Amino acid sequence: FGSSASQPESLPPSLSPCARWHLGHTVWTMPAPVVAEEGRALFRTIMRLHRMKLPGPMRSLGDAYVRREFRLHYQPDVKEAHRTMFMREWSGYVQTISNQESVVGRELSDDQRAKLNDEQKKQLGELERNAKSIGQK
């Protein structure tokens, strides 16, 4: 279902085969049961990485955010272009935290911030407030 490109060589050996697949393949249009399974596999990969990489408070916040995003955006009636973009961005997240010794995050670029709608800006503000309040405890 993906490209025949070889797996990236820089992947940590601790990644599951599923995570390796997500990082090394392009997401193509697939039948609905396969699409649903692919989304579940990516979700499980993210949750596994959170268990391995994130400290307790960050994990709690990150897990809740990932659950919410997948619940809201990974639905059967989502357009294929949106599903592909969703999968690409979350696969990029997997690659980012997989390659970090410790998870430190990164700032959004001005271009990324400009693309956020009002609801996303509000969510980002709430996320920043929650993360800062955890750091002060």
Image (cartoon, grey):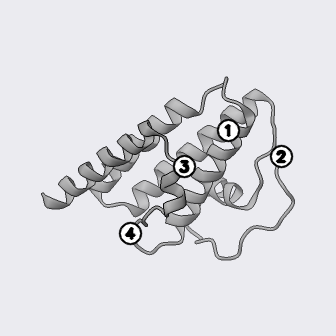
Which residue occupies 72% across, 35% down? 35
Q: Furthest-right residue in view? A: 4
In this figure, which residue is indicated by the disc labeled 1?
83
Give the residue type at disc 2: Phe
Residue 87 in the image, given as x and y percentages of width and height? 64, 46
**Mark positioned earlier in the residue sequence (1 or 4):** 1
74 shown above or below 51: above
Residue 96 in the image, given as x and y percentages of width and height? 54, 65
Is residue 1 shown to the viewer in this render? yes
Which residue occupies 40% across, 72% down? 102
Sort mark 1 into few (<14), some (14-19) or many (20+) by Cα contacts within 10 Å.
Answer: many
Give the residue type at disc 1: Arg
Residue 105 in the image, given as x and y percentages of width and height? 41, 65
Instruction: Calculate the distance from the C-alpha at mark 1 to the C-alpha at mark 4.
Output: 27 Å
Question: Where is residue 106, by image quadrant?
Answer: bottom left
Give the residue type at disc 4: Val
Element at label 3: loop
Side of 60 where 102 appears, left or right: right
In this figure, which residue is indicated by the disc labeled 2?
1
Q: Furthest-left residue in view? A: 137
In this figure, which residue is indicated by the disc labeled 3?
115
Side of 117 where 40 appears, left or right: right
**Mark positioned earlier in the residue sequence (3 or 4):** 4
